[in-house]
Image (spheres, helix red, strand yellow):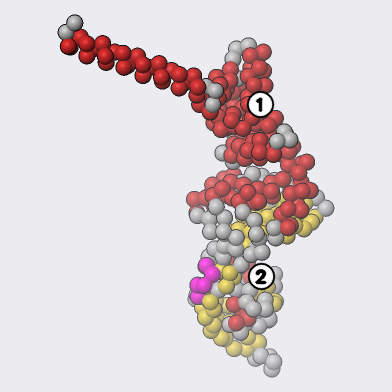
Amino acid sequence: MSQLASQAILILSTVLVMQAVTGAEQTGAEQTGTGKDGLVSRAIAQLGANQYADREAASRQLTAMGVVAINQLTRAAQGDDPEISVRAVDALRVMLRQDDSELSNKAEAALESIAEKGTSAVAQQAEVALGFFDAAQAVSARMTLEQLGAVISETSPTGIRVEINENWKGDSRSLRLVTRLQNVIHVSLFGTQLTQEDAGTLGRLRAIERLDLFGVGLSDDVIKQLRQRLPETEIDIRKGGKLGIAGMPLQGQCIIAGVQPGSSAEKAGLLPQDVIMEINKKPISDFADCTRIIGEHKPGEEIALLIQRINPDGSSNQIQKVVVLGGW
């Protein structure tokens, strides 16, 4: 046998050995994570099978797989096949109600992710699944939120307000508990820096009537998306600057009704009954106008005020003030 033929046989033998080793590794992998991924993929494909019995069997198989199936189910729920999408969400719904806390928490996070993608039928299905779960968790959610610093109050016989301010000790996951509360109609966030994930959570509060976002650090693009998610909600956006006054609800004048102790207004020497005539040389028509303009400024920024003050003898004089705004 020639040397060239011997080398060819040696190379071929090496290739065959490597293929055998690779096959053995793949067989072993089927018993670990990689193999389970393959089983999950095949089961998800069967969710769209022609036979009802096959679809039902695949649903049961996926829910039995538990945590290892969640990532692929989340992707499948947002796919193009309506049957697979609906069944994927339903499998996550079943997992959500299991006693296994790890499985339930991960299924909840997956459903929240699906619900936050938009207004599609599948997103709404995910919201419904979370809604039924949240109803059973509402009391616990309220207790946890209040322990973390949220202020929850009844604003009417049928609705509650949630206020989150500088005393808030929670994080993005804690904020999701707001979606479990029942009959929330007003949410206010003051001086709490929010993430895009937090904005997605707020976007699920489709029944709220008012949303106050004061100094929360969201970009204009994120706020635009939030307005699209909540078209029926009155959203008040302010950059976080705070003067620290209460105003009288009068048209044509911005009369200070009260000055908050320790506020920028008190430090600048503003008094009740002072009339704010101008801010940065712009005429002020009423307290709402004043509030809007202050809201366009960040904490630490300076504003120039023109004040009219009534003296004890009935006379008046105009005073100019430069005020460094505080924050919420």
Residue 160 is a magenta residue? no
Extreme residue toward the bottom, this view: 313
Q: In which quarter of the image is the C terminus?
A: bottom right
Which of the numbered marks, if any, corresponds to residue 23? Answer: none
Amino acid at pointer 1:
Thr
Q: In which quarter of the image is residue 274?
A: bottom right
Q: Is 244 placed left or right of 30 in the picture?
A: right
Front label number (1 vs 2):
1
Q: How far apart are marks 1 and 2 (CA)?
A: 61 Å
Which of the numbered marks, if any, corresponds to residue 63? Answer: 1
Q: Quadrant of the N terminus?
A: top left
Q: Point out residue 291 in the picture as x, y percentages from the top left corner.
A: 60, 68
Who's the residue at 53% across and 28% down the image? 33
Who's the residue at 40% across and 16% down the image? 20
Q: Is 281 placed left or right of 147 in the picture?
A: left
Q: In which quarter of the image is residue 244?
A: bottom right
Amino acid at pointer 2:
Gln
